[in-house]
């Protein structure tokens, strides 16, 4: 277990081109010992490249990687003592389940007794105990993925366990249990866990800290709550949450108010320093409610669609050209007509050039 | 419907079996005949149609001095050359194929695929093109008409087959398998022989089988590159023929020539027909 530091890392897969395209733009980051991190982002944003750089499968074009202050940039994978689990199960077909789980320990010359203890403990956690003597190739896909996971967890002294969408092939019920298991393992052994996913729910429920990436760039690092309430860019707002954050093109009217269709919306953000008058207003549909007795920040919309999701209703309405979505309790009756909605000033995020204005 | 299907299936299997086995039965029968039984009229069953004799077989082990054509020595020569060349080809070919599958090579305009094609092109070329270069090469290094010389030539002929089969095979083994082995603590060599190689046994078997077959049946180079010191089986079998075609000893030699391949086929069959060695890593 170790603190993992990435310092000024960047990577390109075509370094010899005159205009190399970067899979990862320069960034620095520290993963604290014993914490759980989720890397979240759309396909092809550089998540896997980042993991491969940490595990040593890919050498970064620039920058340094430190495990507990030790520079490991030039060490090969074998010498880094790190575990990585891939999206699809990788098992050693010719070995039994026991040998599969014992392999990482045997490679590092642990004693037979120690190996047996560790394999037993991990196989109990992952409920693989009854298969230990079967050939690994005979197992189902999700059991095979458990073996992959088990091989990652079997070493106690590992610097960190990197998981690249490890639960894709596992059915939802087991997924839920495994995520909880991983959390328990993390709390028990204080293993640093890094979890790549494109599923925000997975990230939110699993991690202490979420790293949102887009096009080789780290867009935001923070707690689930921060990502939800104060997305640092419009991309994060769009990517996190279901439905995506409401985003409207708008104009600054004064130091604390902006234009919304024909209404004025007040915000808690100080807008005095922004040069460009054109900004975007972002607000979560969860925070938009039907106006009761509020005086400010009321917009009237024409309801165009009401969708019942069982536990809530999603209203889509139009205010001029702007489409606005609001989540409300399903008990509230909605008619397809004019409706007054309240946008709380403290929940309104203002984006200038797609970046959040603080 | 089911019965009809079964009927057709078994009819086909029986016909096919007859088609495959008949020449062998014919050869076995002929190998026990003498001049009379072959040339007078068509005969099939020993003791009933003709009086069996071991003369056809005896000729093969008698020394030339006593009127025989000794094929025992060529037989073991062939075994030695084929096995040695196949083994070396498989070892070198597998290593080359692994490198071609996992690493990116660049030399001018030459890339991995070009190197692979270069290997395969050795087989695309008509063998006659290679005969003079090989002849000059072997005579220069003094290995003409020797077992070692033949082994060298056969390695050139067999390694492309091994490379070709194994490149394709390794390409289908996900590179995550190697990476997992590295992460689990193997160095790149251990990852290859502890993890990738055991998973590639079916590929090795197929490649080995092809090498053995092509090495064993080659007549052309065995004929051109040897004279008196060393002879290989195919050349000796052809040399059996004379003004009176000795069908009996030709049949006997055909049977013992094909015997090793039949044994290989039986040994290998159990590995190939089992799905567990199909190499899928899903």
Image (spheres, coloured by chain):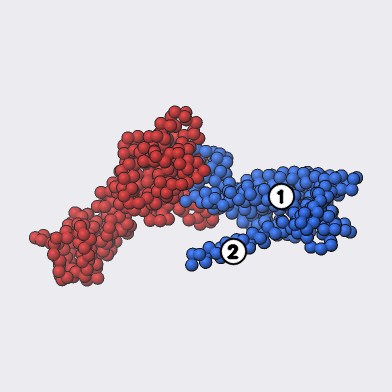
Chain colours: A red, B blue
Q: Residue at x 52, y 45 (%)?
A: B178
Element type where label 2 sits in the image? helix
Residue A109 image position (x, y, % from top left): 50, 31
Question: Which of the pair B5/A39 is nearer the observer?
Answer: B5
Q: Chain of mark 2?
A: B
Q: Chain of mark 1?
A: B
* Labels in figure, total: 2
The numbered mark at residue B11 is: 2
The residue tagged 1 is B259
Question: Which of the pair A313/A98 is nearer the observer?
Answer: A98
Residue B22 image position (x, y, % from top left): 70, 59
Distance CA(mark 2)–CA(mark 1): 28 Å
Q: Residue at x 35, y 34 (%)?
A: A189
Above or below for A11 versus B190: below
Above or below for B281 versus A68: below
Q: Residue at x 57, y 61 (%)?
A: B10
Q: Residue at x 15, y 66 (%)?
A: A334
């Amino acid at each position: 277990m170790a603190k993992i530091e990435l310092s000024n890392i960047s990577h390109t897969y075509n370094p010899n081109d005159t205009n190399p395209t970067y899979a990862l733009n320069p960034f620095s980051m520290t993963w604290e010992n014993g914490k759980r991190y989720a890397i979240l982002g759309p396909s092809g944003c550089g998540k896997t490249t980042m993991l491969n750089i940490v595990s040593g499968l890919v050498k970064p074009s620039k920058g340094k990687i430190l495990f507990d202050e030790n520079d490991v940039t030039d060490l090969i994978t074998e010498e880094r003592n790190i575990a990585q689990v891939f999206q699809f199960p990788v098992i050693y077909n010719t070995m039994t389940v026991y040998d599969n789980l014992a392999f990482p320990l045997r490679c590092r010359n642990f004693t037979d007794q120690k190996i047996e203890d560790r394999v037993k403990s991990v196989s109990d956690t992952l409920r693989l105990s009854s298969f230990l003597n079967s050939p690994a190739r005979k197992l189902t896909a999700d059991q095979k993925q458990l073996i992959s996971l088990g091989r990652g967890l079997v070493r106690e002294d590992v610097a960190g366990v990197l998981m690249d969408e490890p639960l894709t092939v596992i059915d939802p019920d087991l997924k839920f249990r495994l995520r909880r298991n991983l959390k328990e393992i993390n709390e028990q052994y204080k293993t640093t866990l890094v979890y790549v996913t494109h599923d925000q729910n997975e990230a939110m429920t699993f991690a202490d800290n979420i790293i949102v990436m887009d096009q080789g760039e780290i867009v935001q690092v923070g707690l689930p709550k921060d990502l939800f309430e104060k997305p640092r860019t419009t991309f994060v707002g769009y990517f996190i949450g279901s439905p995506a954050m409401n985003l409207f093109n708008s104009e600054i009217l004064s130091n604390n108010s902006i234009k919304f269709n024909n209404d004025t919306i007040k915000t808690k953000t100080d807008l005095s320093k922004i040069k460009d008058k054109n900004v975007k207003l972002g607000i979560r549909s969860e925070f938009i409610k039907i106006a009761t007795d509020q005086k400010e920040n009321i917009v009237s919309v024409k309801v165009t669609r009401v969708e019942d999701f069982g536990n809530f209703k999603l209203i889509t309405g139009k205010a001029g050209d702007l489409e606005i979505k609001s989540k409300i309790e399903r008990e509230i009756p909605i008619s397809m007509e004019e409706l007054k909605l309240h946008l709380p000033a403290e929940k309104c995020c203002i984006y200038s050039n797609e970046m959040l204005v603080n | 419907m089911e019965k009809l299907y079964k009927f057709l299936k078994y009819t086909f299997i029986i016909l096919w079996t007859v088609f495959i086995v008949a020449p062998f039965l014919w050869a076995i029968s002929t190998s026990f005949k003498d001049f009379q039984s072959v040339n007078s009229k068509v005969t099939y069953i020993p003791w009933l149609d003709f009086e069996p004799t071991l003369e056809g077989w005896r000729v093969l082990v008698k020394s030339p001095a006593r009127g025989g054509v000794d094929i025992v020595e060529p037989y073991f020569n062939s075994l030695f050359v084929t096995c040695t060349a196949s083994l070396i080809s498989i070892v070198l070919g597998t290593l080359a194929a692994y490198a071609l599958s996992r690493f990116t090579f660049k030399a001018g305009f030459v890339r991995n695929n070009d190197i692979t094609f270069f290997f395969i092109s050795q087989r695309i070329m008509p063998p006659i093109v290679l005969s003079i270069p090989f002849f000059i090469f072997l005579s220069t290094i003094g290995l003409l008409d020797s077992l070692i010389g033949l082994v060298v030539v056969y390695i050139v002929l067999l390694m492309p087959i091994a490379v070709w089969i194994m490149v394709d095979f390794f390409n289908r083994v996900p590179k995550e398998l190697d990476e997992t082995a590295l992460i689990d603590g193997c160095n790149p060599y251990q990852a290859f022989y502890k993890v990738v190689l055991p998973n590639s046994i079916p590929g090795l078997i197929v490649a080995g089988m092809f090498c053995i077959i092509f090495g064993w049946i080659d007549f052309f180079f065995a004929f051109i590159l040897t004279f008196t010191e060393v002879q290989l089986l195919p050349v000796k079998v052809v040399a059996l023929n004379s003004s009176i075609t000795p069908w009996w000893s030709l049949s006997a030699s055909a049977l013992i020539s094909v015997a090793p391949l039949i044994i290989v086929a039986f040994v290998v069959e159990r590995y190939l027909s089992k799905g567990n060695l199909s190499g899928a890593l899903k």
